[in-house]
């Protein structure tokens, strides 16, 4: 039987009004001083973990809007992800993307504080959307998660293989998409450092520790030092314990991928990236006695893995990119690319 992934206009509107809006905005009481918070970071950076902390800090309930979360309201979302059908998943993303802009319009209309979460490869979209909210009387804050490529690429691979284990067959984002988010994060902070497009900029490191947090004022119109703070967070070397934990996770994901050939084919490029990072950045961080051969032995093993992975590399399956939401916000339509 053919499954209809498309939603008619009437059905889409009904789901939005009866399911999406009540779930995202359970309380419609206006906030006296509403705030919009953008949580940014590349795929695998752990940005979703930040949201709970923000909710605890904020005096008002925060609605959370993300493209990934809204797709789950599609009535056949689970069937799409469990089937592994990339075209079905693309259609689900396209059919649900208007809900994102609708949620932003609703938040502005009822003046409710909210979090907008994403990788944001296009920094100007964040700035434009922040401007729309600011014009409606919202305070604007950007929270950036500064995580090294070693950890975020690992986080991306680990999350994907966990989904495979759980029978959820979503497309692997890939290193290219990861790096677009990485570059977009740096570009966003650079843009904000020199502009007046947000009221507050916060940068967190991999542990959730605040490494930069400034509010704009007449006396301090720029976020001076923000780019340097992000770079320090992204480039901070791992501690010996963190390096050992990272290596353990690399071994786990490698073994899992080898036992699941379909999954390994998708993540091979990212595994190559991880082993290269391991040789270059992680192994040198290990605390070993002088004269120990542990690092040299581990390097040989990593080089062997690299040789095997490069030999097995084959053309990747077509990669699914979620349908973008509108990127030019207006008073009636606003959006953020995932």
Image (spheres, rainbow, N blue to C red):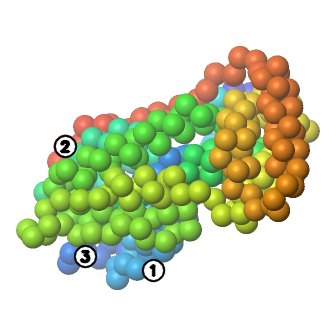
Across and down, in percent, residue 9 comes to 41, 37
Out of 105 and 155, give the one closest to the viewer. Answer: 155
The residues bearing labels 2 and 3 have C-alpha atoms spaced at a distance of: 22 Å
In the image as oriented, which residue stretches furthest toward the top?
315
Residue 56's disc number: 1
At a point 50% along the width and 53% down the height, the residue shown is 234
SS category of the residue bearing label 1: helix
Residue at figure coordinates x 55%, y 51% from the top left? 148
* Dots 2, 3 in contact, CB < 8 A: no
Q: Residue at x 88, y 50 (%)?
A: 293
**In the rendered picture of this protein, how many numbered marks are placed on residues?**
3
Residue 133 coordinates in the image, percent (x, y): 21, 57
Q: Which class describes the residues within 10 Å of circle 2: few (<14), some (14-19), or many (20+)?
A: some
Q: Residue furthest bottom?
A: 59
Secondary-structure class at tag 3: loop
Residue bearing mark 2: 330
Q: Nearer the viewer, residue 7 or 25?
A: 25
Residue 222, position as x, y percentages in the image: 18, 59
């Amino acid at each position: 039987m053919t499954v209809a992934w498309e939603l008619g206009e009437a059905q889409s509107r009904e789901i939005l009004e009866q399911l999406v809006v009540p779930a995202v905005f359970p309380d419609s009481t206006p906030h006296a001083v509403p705030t919009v918070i953008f949580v940014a970071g590349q795929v695998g950076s752990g940005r979703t973990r930040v949201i709970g902390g923000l909710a605890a800090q904020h005096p008002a309930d925060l609605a959370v809007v993300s493209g990934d979360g809204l797709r789950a309201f599609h009535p056949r979302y689970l069937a799409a992800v469990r089937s592994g059908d990339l075209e079905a998943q693309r259609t689900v993303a396209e059919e649900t993307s208007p809900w994102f802009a609708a949620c932003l319009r609703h938040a502005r209309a009822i003046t409710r504080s909210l979090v907008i979460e994403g990788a944001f490869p296009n920094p100007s979209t964040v700035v434009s959307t922040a401007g729309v909210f600011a014009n409606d009387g919202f305070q604007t804050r950007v929270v950036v998660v500064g995580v090294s490529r070693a950890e975020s690429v690992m986080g991306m691979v680990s999350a994907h293989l966990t989904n495979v284990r759980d029978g959820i067959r979503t497309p692997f984002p890939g290193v290219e998409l990861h790096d677009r988010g990485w570059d977009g994060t740096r570009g966003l902070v650079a843009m904000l450092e020199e502009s007046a497009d947000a009221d507050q900029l916060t940068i967190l490191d991999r542990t959730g520790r605040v490494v930069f947090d400034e509010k704009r004022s007449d006396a301090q119109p720029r976020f001076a030092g923000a780019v340097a703070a992000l770079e320090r967070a992204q480039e901070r070397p791992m501690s010996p314990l963190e390096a050992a934990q990272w290596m353990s996770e690399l071994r786990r994901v490698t073994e899992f991928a080898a036992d699941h050939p379909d999954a390994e084919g998708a993540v091979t490029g990212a595994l190559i990236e991880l082993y290269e990072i391991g040789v270059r950045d992680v192994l040198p961080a290990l605390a070993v006695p002088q004269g120990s051969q542990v690092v040299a032995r581990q390097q040989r093993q990593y080089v062997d893995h690299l040789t095997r992975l490069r030999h097995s590399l084959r053309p990747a399956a077509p990669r699914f990119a979620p349908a973008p939401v509108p990127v030019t916000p207006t008073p009636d339509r606003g959006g953020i690319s995932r």
